[in-house]
Amino acid sequence: MAAPRQVERPLSPHLQIYRFTITMAMSIIHRITGVGLYLGMILLAWWLIAAATGPDAYAVFLGVANGWLGKLILFGFTWALIHHLLSGIRYFFWDEAKAFDIPAADRMSWLAAVGGVLLTVLVWVAAIALRGVM
Amino acid sequence: MSTNDMRTPKAKISYLGSARSGTGDHALQRATALAIAPLAIFFIVSVVALAGAEYETARAYLANPLVSILFIALIGAVVIHMRIGVKIVIEDYVHGETLKHFTLIANSFFSYAIGLACIYAVLKIGFSS
């Protein structure tokens, strides 16, 4: 009867041991924005159901969406979506074993982080400028 | 492999890696991401165009068959993507077997319920316009 081949592996050190790297921060933010978008899907469902229900239900949605808290949440949702989208592109490179060296991985990560913020601001500037076009 | 190997199949695969559904989840997560990327851009452009729009305008836009189809495609891909994404998060952080199983089921219920609600609403707008 052979003994189970349980391998003794080293335990990884705790979180605060690690030096800050952009790839590590982006990994955490990717997960947080993912969970945020998951919960944010309630807002999409609310918008679509309100539009399907009628003018009164839609007015309630618009009332909340146009308030300062609604705008803040929608701004956060926009950023989370754009950030998660750009950040997610990196995984397609890494799945193909491309851009795996640290400088390339760092460059891609900074590009996604900064690009996400800039594009979010751009989208909101466009939305405010085009307000009432349709 | 030698022919006089007396070990059981279980002993041969033990500690040699996962035998569960992770690979399939990974492939599906990437495939749905690929579908979502252009659809999400379309979604953002739609919402920007509809910013401040009144009920009739928003409804007329959503009732356009092409818009409806793209929205339903987006929602369908998102439901699969969000379910796998949060499944991975739960598997990472929830360790008790019973709690983990029920949390995973709750994740599936939430994801499919959101998908069902969104798709029903889009279809209702499309078919009643």
Image (cartoon, rainbow, N blue to C red):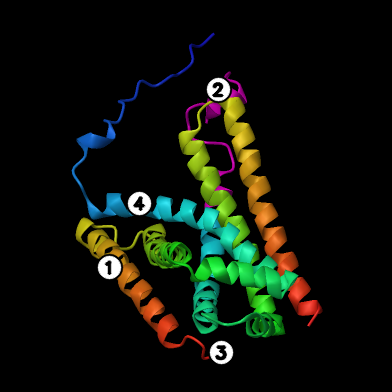
Please name the residue shown 58% across and 26% down the image.
B97
- Which label lies toward us, 4 or 3? 3
Give the amino acid at mark 2. Answer: Ala
Tell me whether marks 4 and 3 sit on the same chain: yes
Please name the residue shown 68% across and 53% down the image.
B112
Task: For marks 4 and 3, give the CA distance.
Answer: 38 Å
Q: Which secondary structure type mostly characterizes the magenta part of the structure?
A: loop
Callout 1 secondary element: helix
Give the amino acid at mark 3. Answer: Met
- Sequence-wise first label, 4 or 3: 4
* Farthest residue, direction bottom: A133
Q: Chain of mark 1?
A: A
Relative vertical location of residue B78 with respect to residue B100 in this rendering, above or below = below
Residue A44 location (% of width, % of height): 59, 65
Which residue is label 3 attached to? A134
Looking at the rendering, the stretch of residues picked out in magenta corresponds to B1-26
Query: Mark 3–mark 2 contact, CB under 8 Å?
Result: no
Query: Mark 2–mark 1 contact, CB under 8 Å?
Result: no
Task: For marks 1 and 3, give the CA distance.
Answer: 30 Å
* Farthest residue, direction top: A1
